[in-house]
Image (tube, grey):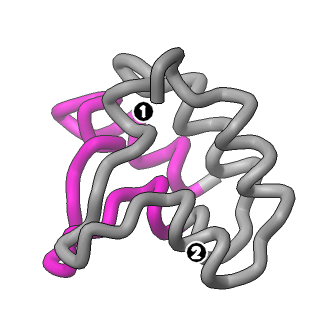
């Protein structure tokens, strides 16, 4: 609900989904790290493109796949694999 509110009210609209924190994390990284499949789904469905939000690296070179695996979130990994852009 919070992410939806931000997207709907941010001046940049869905571009906010691609923004990075000071640590280089995107909303996808944070959702993957914390096991929030519904948030991942919202981001993928509302992002300008899947490629815009999937497989982005943080400042340590970790993608959402790395972060989900590191934190043991199998459902997140499954979702990402099923929705990754072709060739990713």
Query: Considering only vertical position in the picture, is 88 above or below 3?
Result: above
Q: Position of residue 34 (x, y in %)?
A: 65, 76
Give the residues in magenta.
2-30
Q: Quick one: SS at disc 2?
A: helix
In the image, taking residue 73 as reference, residue 51 lies left or right, namely left
Q: Residue at x 14, y 78 (%)?
A: 22
Query: Considering only vertical position in the picture, is 57 above or below 86?
Result: below
Query: Considering only vertical position in the picture, is 55 above or below 29?
Result: above
Q: Residue at x 32, y 48 (%)?
A: 56
Q: Position of residue 37 (x, y in %)?
A: 75, 53
Q: Position of residue 74 (x, y in %)?
A: 83, 64
Q: Circle 1 sits on which residue?
A: 8
Which mark is first along the chain, 1 or 2?
Answer: 1
Task: Name the foreground residue: 43 vs 3.
Answer: 43
Q: Position of residue 18 (x, y in %)?
A: 27, 42
Task: Name the foreground residue: 76 vs 70.
Answer: 70
In the image, taking residue 30 as reference, residue 74 lies left or right, namely right
**Between marks 2 and 1, how big is the CA–CA gap?**
24 Å
Q: Main secondary structure of the magenta part?
A: helix
The answer to which quarter of the image holds residue 42 is top right
Residue 56 on the magenta span: no
Furthest residue to the right?
A: 75
Q: Circle 2 sits on which residue?
A: 33
Q: Residue at x 18, y 34 (%)?
A: 11
Furthest residue to the front?
A: 87
């Amino acid at each position: 609900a919070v992410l939806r509110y931000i997207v709907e009210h941010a001046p940049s609209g869905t571009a906010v989904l691609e923004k990075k924190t000071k640590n280089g994390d995107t909303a996808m990284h944070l959702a993957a790290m914390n096991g929030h499949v519904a948030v991942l789904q919202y981001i993928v469905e509302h992002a300008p493109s899947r490629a815009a939000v999937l497989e982005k690296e943080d400042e340590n070179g970790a993608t959402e796949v790395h972060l989900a695996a590191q934190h043991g979130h199998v459902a997140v990994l499954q979702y990402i694999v099923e929705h990754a852009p072709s060739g990713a």
